[in-house]
Image (cartoon, rainbow, N blue to C red):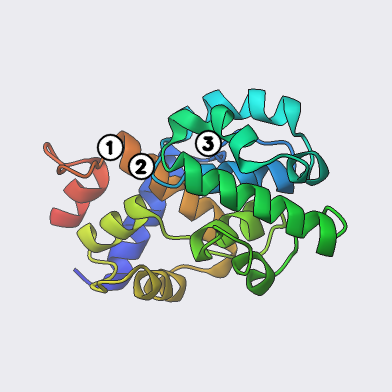
Amino acid sequence: MRIAQRVAIVAEELERCFPSPQIPLKHRDAFTLLIAVMLSARCTDERVNKITPALFRVAPTPQKLASMEPAELRPYIATCGLADSKALHIVQTARILTEHYDGKVPRSFEELEALPGVGHKTAGVVMNQAFGYPAFPVDTHIFRLARRWKLSRATTVERVETDLKRLFPQESWGKLHLRIILWGRTYCKARGCNPPCPICARLRA
């Protein structure tokens, strides 16, 4: 099957099942989204959504969070995994936002990726979901499914991202990112796709 046919099948099935995908992390602005995505590293979105309401009640702004010490923050995120390093990075990031960006989240990949604990994927999520910038953040679900569906043979996240950006139109990247994540969680999981999900079944036909 040609790659163009694969792309068409994937796009069709994803849109059919998830026509209006929403980001799973609860947030109210760019700042709370940034913190939620930082917390989601090696942690489920469900767990993040359970702990952020209490956190954002005591620290709803970068200024409030910047006034805390990592040790004060840690109890709020203790069940999220990597709590010590996350607490340190989140407080450091809040202080940078307060001191250098007037309490606002910067709107460029370069500035976001320079923040402590913020990698390319996190920056991509914020740029796309908070600011509407075309980005295609690749997480473990997207990496796995891109290879399973033979959309990419790359062995790194960066190369998979490049391949997917080449295959799909730019205006679809944001929704496609969310759709593939939802698909991977719902139908086509890490341990395998048995029986085949609708996409895998059509691709094998």
Is the residue marked by circle 3 packed among few (<14), some (14-19), or many (20+) residues within 10 Å?
some
Separation of marks 3 and 2 at Cα, in angstroms: 13 Å
Residue assigned mark 3: 24
Is 27 placed left or right of 175 in the picture? right
Residue 102 sits in quarter: bottom right
Q: Amino acid at mark 2?
A: Trp
Mark count: 3
Residue 198, given in percent of the width and then of the height, sits at 25, 42
Q: Nearer the viewer, mark 3 or mark 2?
A: 3
Asked whether the viewer can see residue 114, the reply is yes
Residue at the location (52% across, 69% down)?
169
Q: Secondary structure at mark 2?
A: helix
Q: Amino acid at mark 3?
A: Pro
Residue at the location (36% across, 46% down)?
13
Residue 147, given in percent of the width and then of the height, sits at 24, 63
Residue assigned mark 1: 187
Residue at the location (30% across, 61% down)?
146
Q: Nearer the viewer, mark 3 or mark 1?
A: 3
Q: Amino acid at mark 1?
A: Tyr
Q: Secondary structure at mark 1?
A: loop
Q: Secondary structure at mark 3?
A: loop
Residue assigned mark 2: 183
Task: Kindly check if marks 2 and 1 are in contact, taking CB atoms under 8 A apart as contact.
Answer: yes
